[in-house]
Amino acid sequence: MELLKQRIQSEGLALTEHVLKVDSFLNHQVDPKLMEAMGEEFARYFKDHHITKVFTIESSGIAPTVMTALKLGIPMVTLKKQASKILNQEVYQTEVRSFTKDLRYLLTLSKNYITPEDNILIIDDFLAMGEAALGAARLAEEAGAKVAGIGIVIEKSFQPGREKLEEAGYEVYSLARIQKLGKGIIEFLT
Amino acid sequence: MELLKQRIQSEGLALTEHVLKVDSFLNHQVDPKLMEAMGEEFARYFKDHHITKVFTIESSGIAPTVMTALKLGIPMVTLKKQASKILNQEVYQTEVRSFTKDLRYLLTLSKNYITPEDNILIIDDFLAMGEAALGAARLAEEAGAKVAGIGIVIEKSFQPGREKLEEAGYEVYSLARIQKLGKGIIEFLT
């Protein structure tokens, strides 16, 4: 998505070979017009995938995902990050390890908001090791639902996330794919 | 806002005299069309307030707030909840106590995304004790900016939040005002 790549190039801060800050339009300050354009692009790409619900993980994925859900005319479900196990039968939970933030959390989904008939699109802001997206997919599949695809705003293509998701059989569509990061360096794959 | 009141009445779960769950359309599963309608309503109400930025607090306020920011044509800033103090000069932080969740966190705003010229609208999903909104207002004012108003999706009018915000001089606009909660009881103020 050209518009997004331009914003990453002009406003993104490559702090190290692995860390890209996009706090001016995605992760802290948020440009709603760009979010709408992303929602339109995800909806265009996945329009024939018969999606019934869009999942995201709190909290930076929410803005582009609610726009996608609006354009597709279906509900969004925000998966919660819980610090500890919820002891009841009303939720699905799975442990996710965040390498970027060096922590673990329990991704949580209420059983009320998924059925075996659901066909889920998972959207997240970043793809690095793929752990969050794989966790979201486990929750959908534990409920007997199908994962119809995974939409990513910014993919770090030099990390193994996409490969792991594709090996697991998921279709991945990323709006921007980054080949290389370094101090002051941001190179896109295509 | 009639549409919201109908959804609260038909889908809201009053668990106790203080707890209302609206997980089916706002806090876990999210109805994007309702979020868009809320964004239109907040934008309509505040359109002559010369707002330059909309603040919200992660994460349940993000969906209605990004829609409001889109309709107003201005950026959103998502204030972060940090567990511990960030030791640098690049952020404003203030402690907020959540009575509902019985915890404290440090509401955090990067200095890059606010100026003394800003005129801030603060939006949050619930208003109970007013602590989160007051914290957001403190951050804006610490930067020398003005708080132009506070928009709330669901106000618990039987708790002192609105009174505290109005006493501090802020204009509050709530889409739904709840007078009384109880097991199976949801009564609106108007």
Image: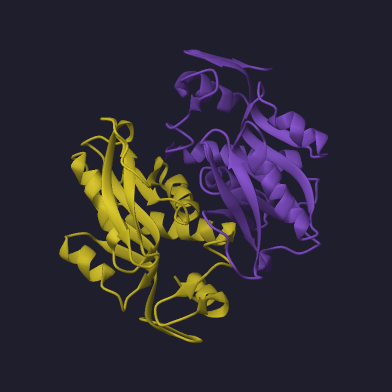
Chain colours: A yellow, B purple
Counting every numbered tag in the picture gives 0
Give the residue at x 32% y 76%.
A157
Q: Quadrant of residue B6?
A: top right
Pinpoint residue A168: horizontal percent, then vertical percent: 17, 61
Residue B160 location, x and y as percent?
70, 27
Viewer-closest of B17 and B59: B17
The residue depicted at 47 percent of the width and 13 percent of the height is: B183
Q: Quadrant of residue A177?
A: bottom left
Above-or-below relation of B20 to B79 = above
Q: Is residue B72 visible?
A: yes
State left or right for residue A182 relative to residue B175. left
The C terminus of chain A lies in which quarter of the figure? bottom left
Above or below B10: residue A71:
below
Query: Residue B60 vs residue B129: left or right?
Result: left
Image quadrant where residue A116 sits: top left
Answer left or right for A111 relative to B142.
Answer: left
Residue under the image location 72 percent in, 34 percent down: B173
Q: Is residue A131 above or below residue A50?
A: below
Q: Which image quadrant: the N terminus of chain A?
A: bottom left
Please state the horizontal and vertical placement of residue B117, each as a whole percent of the image: 81, 62
Residue B174 pos. (x, y %): 68, 32
Asked if residue A50 can be seen in this view, the reply is no
Residue lying at 57% horizontally and 23% vertically, measured from the top left:
B5
